[in-house]
Amino acid sequence: MRPELLNPLFAETESLDGVGPKLKKPLEKLGLVKVKDVAYHLPDRFVQRRAVTDLDEASVGEQIVIALTVTEHRGGGSNRAPYRVLAQDEAGNVVALTYFGRASYSAKKQLPVGSKRWVAGKLDRYGDMLQIVHPDHVSEDSSGAMGNLVEPVYPLAEGLTQPRVAGLAHQALDRCPDLPEWIEPGVLSDHDWAGWREAMVLAHRGEHSAARDRLAYDEMLANSLALLLVKEANRKRRGQPLSGDGHLRTRLELPFPLTGAQERSNREIESDLAQEAPMLRLLQGDVGAGKTVVALEAMLIAVEAGAQAAMLAPTEILARQHYETLRKLAAPTGVHIALLTGRDKGKARESILMGLLDGSIQIVVGTHAIFQDAVNYRNLGLVVIDEQHRFGVSQRLQLARKGKKTPHTLAMTATPIPRTLTLAQYGEMDVSRLDEMPPGRQPIDTRVISAERIEDIVAAISRHLESGAQAYWVCPMVRENEGEDLAAAEARYATLKERFGDGVVLVHGQLRPELKDAAMERFANGDAQLLVATTVIEVGVDVPNATLMVIEQAERFGLAQLHQLRGRVGRGSQKSTCLLLRGEMLSEVGRQRLALMRETQDGFRLAEEDLKLRGGGELLGTRQSGDTPFHIADLDQIERLLPIAHSDARLLVERDGVLASSRGEAARVLLYLFERDWGVQLLRGG
C-alpha cells in the first residue's frame, strides 16, 4: 500500500484550482496527470532581470524591471497597428510599451494615464524610440515586480501559458509534504544537498543546479534500489540447476566457428544455469554478432538437463523469424521446436498446448501468447527474451511465475547501450557482451549524400530493384510530432509508388498491427521490393535480399538509431549499401554523427560517442529518444551521479534487505514516490 503521506501528491491534477476539462487536455499532453507530475515539471531555463532606476542604466536587449509613470495612450488606428502606451522613468526618459492585437484591451485597464507602475520586460529599440513589447509583468507595487527578477520558463503545450503553469506549479509545491530523508547522510553532506521538499522549491526558483541534482539523484536511487531488490529476491528464489551433458550441442553444425565473445558468453551462461539461484543475464550484442546461436546453446543445455525452454519475441514477425532460424540450426539435434502466436487457433493451438504440457515440445518460440494463463509447461527451465527493452521489469517478473521453480532468464538486446545506461536499465542483471563480429560478415558501404541529389538516388534504386534485390527507404523523424512523421512517410510513399508501382509497401507506427504485419510479410517474402517506413523497422526484421538502405534527413536521428537502421541490410552474402541523405542545415553535432557512421560499424563505440555528443541538453536527448528510464535526470547527471546512486542502493540492500530500518522505511516512500513499487512488492509484507 502506498504510504498515506504521499496521497496529496498522487491526487489528480483536477484537484488543483483552475484545472477543468479544458485545461486537463494540454496538461495530459505534457504527461501531467497527478499533482506530483506538476511539482516535478521543472523549468527549462530562467529569465534573469535587473532592477534599474532609469533607462540610462539599461542596455538594449536587456531584461529589466523599472518604475514608470504613464503619460499617453496612442491607439492603433487599425487592428493591425500596434497600440502604444508612452511612459517616463524618474529621469524623464520616454519608453513605449507596445501591444499588438487583443493585448491592447488589458493595456488600457492596467495602465491609466498618470499612474505609476512597475514594468518587467525586455528593452528594445524601434527607430529612435526605446520600447518594451508586450511587457511580461505590470504591477502596482514594487514587491510584485521585484518578485520577478528571476523567472522560470516552463515547457508548454498548446493551450497553456507561462503564468498558468507557474501558478499550478506553485499550488503543487504548496501540497508537497515533508518526507523522511532516504539519501545516505554522507552523500547528502558531500554534495551539500537540501532536504527533498526544499530542493523541490529551489529547483523552481532559479539556477539551483544542486537542487536539481538532488531530485535527479532521488530518481536514480529509486531505480537502482528497485532493480537491486529484484536481483536480491531472485537470489533467494529456488530455481532448478540445469547441467547439460553436451549430447545435443555437439550435434550442431554451425555455418562458421564461434567468435571468442560467443564462447565467453556461452561459458558465463553455462555456469549461471548450473546454479540453483535463477540466472538473470543480459546478452548485449550488435546486429549480426550472433546472439541467436548463443541463445540456442543455452536452450539446448536446458533440454539436455530434461527441462523446456521458451523464447519470447516482441512481434509476430520476429517470432516467426526466430522460429525458422532456430529450426534450421537445430535440425541435426532432433529437438522438437514449436511456434505459438496469438494467431494460432483451434486444433493447431490445442496440439501445441498439449505438447508443452506433456513435455514433447522442448523449445517454444512466440509472442506474449506463450505466457497466457492457458499455457502450461511440463517443466519450464529457461526463458529467453529478445529485444529486452520492450519488456519492463514487471513483465519479466510475471514470466518468472510460469515454471514449477523460477526459470532462468536470458534477455537479449541488439541495441548497443553505453555502460552507464546499462546500469540504469539493467541494474538487476549480469551482462555478457558480444563485441566481436563473426567472420564472413561484409562491412556495409556507408555514404553521406546531399538530399538535393534525390533524383539520382531514385534512379539508383531503380537499377537496384531491376537487379532483383530489395531496398528500404526510411523517412525523416520529425521531433515531437508523429503526425508530421506520418505525412512525410505517406508523401514519400506516394511518389515512390508512382515510380515503382505495387512493389512498394508502407509501414508506420499508426498502422493497425495486422496491416503492419501483412506489409512486412510481403516484403520479407519478396512480394514487395521496396519498403517505405518510419523508424518502426529498427529492430529485428531479417531480409537477406534487402541490400540497400536509404535514410532521409539522417542528421535528425541519434547515432544508435542510425546504426540500428543500417543493421537491417548486410544480412546476406551480397555487398550492402547505406545512403544517409542529409539536409542543408547541418548542425555541428549532426555533421559529427554522420562522419562517425561512415567511420565505424562498431555499435558499442557508436553508443558511447552518441552519449558524448548528446551531452545532457541536445534536443535528441534522453527524454525524446526513450533510451533511459528517467524523466528528471538528464544524461550529464546520469554520468555523474548514477554510479554513486547505484553503490548507495547496494549498500542499503546489503545492510537492510527488507527495508525495515528508519532509512529503509524512507526508501520505501521513495520507491512509491517514483512508482517503482514493484520493488517493494517483492519484500515480504511490502
Image (cartoon, helix red, strand yellow):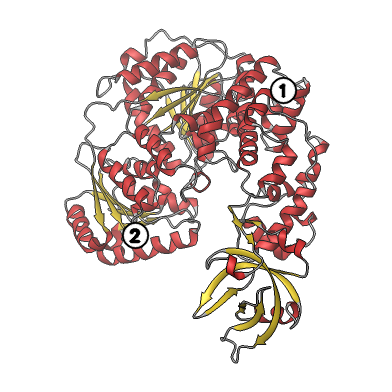
Question: Is the residue 313 above or below the residue 29 in the image?
Answer: above
Q: Label 1, on which residue?
A: 683
Mark pair 2, 1: CA separation = 54 Å
Q: Quadrant of the C terminus?
A: top right
Q: Badge 2: how crowded within 10 Å, few (<14), some, or many (20+)?
A: few
Spot occupied by residue 624 in the image (x, y as percentages of width and height): 50, 48
The quadrant of the picture occupied by the N terminus is: top right
Residue 20 appears in the picture as rendered: no
The residue that appears at 57% across and 65% down in the rendered structure is 58
Callout 1 amino acid: Leu
Q: Are marks 2 and 1 in contact (CB under 8 Å)?
A: no
Residue lying farthest to the front in this orientation: 91
Q: Residue at x 56, y 86 (%)?
A: 80
Label 2 vs 1, first from the N-terminus: 2
Taking the image as drawn, is residue 201 in sight? Answer: yes
Classify residue 433 by image quadrant.
Answer: top left
Question: Regarding mark 1 in the picture, which secondary structure is present there?
Answer: loop
Please name whichever residue, 641 or 508, is drawn nearer the observer in this view of the structure. 641
x, y percentage for residue 651? 64, 18
Instruction: Pinpoint residue 224: horizontal percent, then vertical percent.
Output: 60, 28
Amino acid on which disc 2 is placed? Met
The label shown at residue 585 is 2
Count the labels in the image.
Answer: 2
Residue 380 locus on image (x, y percent): 54, 21
